[in-house]
Image (cartoon, helix red, strand yellow):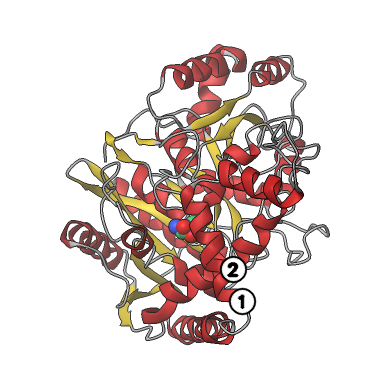
Amino acid sequence: MSRTNMISVAEWREKVEAEGAYNAVAEMLERIEKSKLNAYVTVDKNALKLAEEYDRGKLEGRLAGIPIAVKDNISTKGMRTTCASKILEDYVPIFDAHVIERIKQEGGIIIGKTNMDEFAMGTTTETSYFGVVRNPYDLDRVAGGSSGGSGASIANGEAVLSLGSDTGGSIRCPASFCGVVGLKPTYGLVSRYGLIPYANSLEQIGPMATCVEDLALLLEVIAGKDERDSTNAGRSFTFIPKPRKFKVGIIREMGGNADVMRCFEEAVEVIKGLGCEIGEVSMPSFKYALAAYYVIAMGEASSNLARYDGVRYGYALEQLDSWTKYFSKVRAEGFGSEVKRRIMLGSYALSAGYYGKYYLKALKVRTLVKNDFQRALKDFDVLISPTMPSLPFKIGELADPLTMYKMDVNTVPINLAGVPALSMPIGFVKGLPVGMQIIGNYFAENDILSFALELERAMAE
Ligand code: GLN
């Protein structure tokens, strides 16, 4: 498997041992500055000060001295948090998200905030107010989305670990397109306190890394009890690799184009070589999952985004005439077109007369999707599929929104059910990475990671 400039935690530690954290971080900052990827919205020069502290033995913890990139919808105290939107261009949070508190407690160095689709709405990072993120393997292609910057930064050695958020695939898609590992944890495992919401009932913050072991390390740090998020499960996570002969189910309804399937089938052969028992499983409800996801996600988005009025946050106008005019003008100028489309469609789906027709129906589909997963996970330990149905797209290739939405077909059922899923690289086609999605039962992250670790080792041979 070809590698770009990726650097794992172990390699980073060696480097720091040899040349000191200050020099290593300075070199990384220089790489970011010269980079053509546009992975960052904000870079934090304070990272150098923290690196210096590490060199003086003053920074301790499980992530001590490790540069970590954070998606720009996760609140960082004193550091601009824009959601890649004009409306929040100057917003500086006065508190840290739970995950940021945890990273800081463990001595991690937040090196900057990564570029993303505006308010995490997209699959390619093309809706960002700050411009598209480019794919490290082909600059004319997208890095995926919405956590495009978090994926690209890892792939190009512009960070060692990163955080993304995943509402319908936003960690797994860029992981797949950038050839890195990414995990959407079980709903409730990681506190959402401080995550600027897009669709609360679907999203989770999750780790991205160059390898399974590093991914597990960051997950261990960010998972755990937090009373400030009422949906937090109050559980912590420790990775104990348990290699065994997994029962693996291939989901019939989740496919991909010929390029992707060729690579996927080769990986299935590797899995067979591990002595795993492989079967096929059908999930009939998935036919409706994509439509249900977009109704629910847009509904929640329309209500979440009502708070941006140009008074309480960010973008504001000089002149205040009437309140209605002011509010409309701020939102017309502050939001991009994809965000506006979703606010309008979401408000429509939730309005009286249509609520039963769209929203309630979508909730019913959601139950069917959950049931399908529970049925399949009785027979199998993990379920697999290609993460994305195609190779990374050319920038501008997905011109209409519906075509774009359809690319999420393999990732959204996971969020509807709330189960965990990981994407890991399984090879390259035409020089571009392909990812495999590994799904497990609620809080079965240990199974998913154990299986992924075995597969990663087998693929490296
Ligand atoms: N592409 C999906 C959407 O636009 C998922 C985005 C996400 O996970 N944040 O809704």
- Vertical comparison of 139 with 401: above or below: above
Q: Which residue is mark 1?
A: 351
Q: Amino acid at mark 2?
A: Ser
The kind of secondary structure element at disc 1 is: loop
The residue at 46%/36% (across/down) is 154
Whether 374 is drawn above or below 135: the answer is below
Mark 1 and mark 2: span between their CA atoms? 6 Å
Q: Is residue 129 above or below residue 249?
A: above
User: Depth check: 76 or 63 in front?
Assistant: 76
For disc 2, the neighbor class at 10 Å (few under 14, some 14 to 19, many from 20) is many
Q: Nearer the viewer, residue 194 or 240?
A: 194
* Amino acid type shown at disc 1: Ser
Q: Residue beneath label 2, please?
A: 347
Estimate the x, y position of residue 365 in percent, counting from the top left: 49, 84
Q: Would you say the beta carbon of the disc 2 residue lies within 8 angstroms of ligand 1?
A: no
What is the secondary structure assignment of the residue under circle 2? helix
Mark number for residue 174?
A: none
Q: Would residue 321 be found to the left or right of residue 292 on screen?
A: right
Crowding at dot 1, Cα within 10 Å, few <14 / some 14-19 / many 20+, comes out as: some
Observer-nearest of 339 and 134: 339
101 lies above or below 35:
below
Asked if disc 1 and disc 2 are in contact, CB closer than 8 Å, the reply is yes
Q: Please provide percent x and percent y for residue 103.
A: 70, 39
Q: What residue is at 41 percent from the left and 84 percent from the top?
A: 285
x then y, percent, for residue 422: 46, 58
Residue 420 visible from this viewpoint: no
For residue 233, which quarter of the picture? bottom right
Judged left or right of residue 374, residue 283 is left
Residue lying farthest to the front in this orientation? 321
Q: Please tell me which residue is depicted at 56% across the width and 79% down the height of the picture.
A: 359
Ligand 1 near label 1 (Cβ, under 8 Å)?
Answer: no
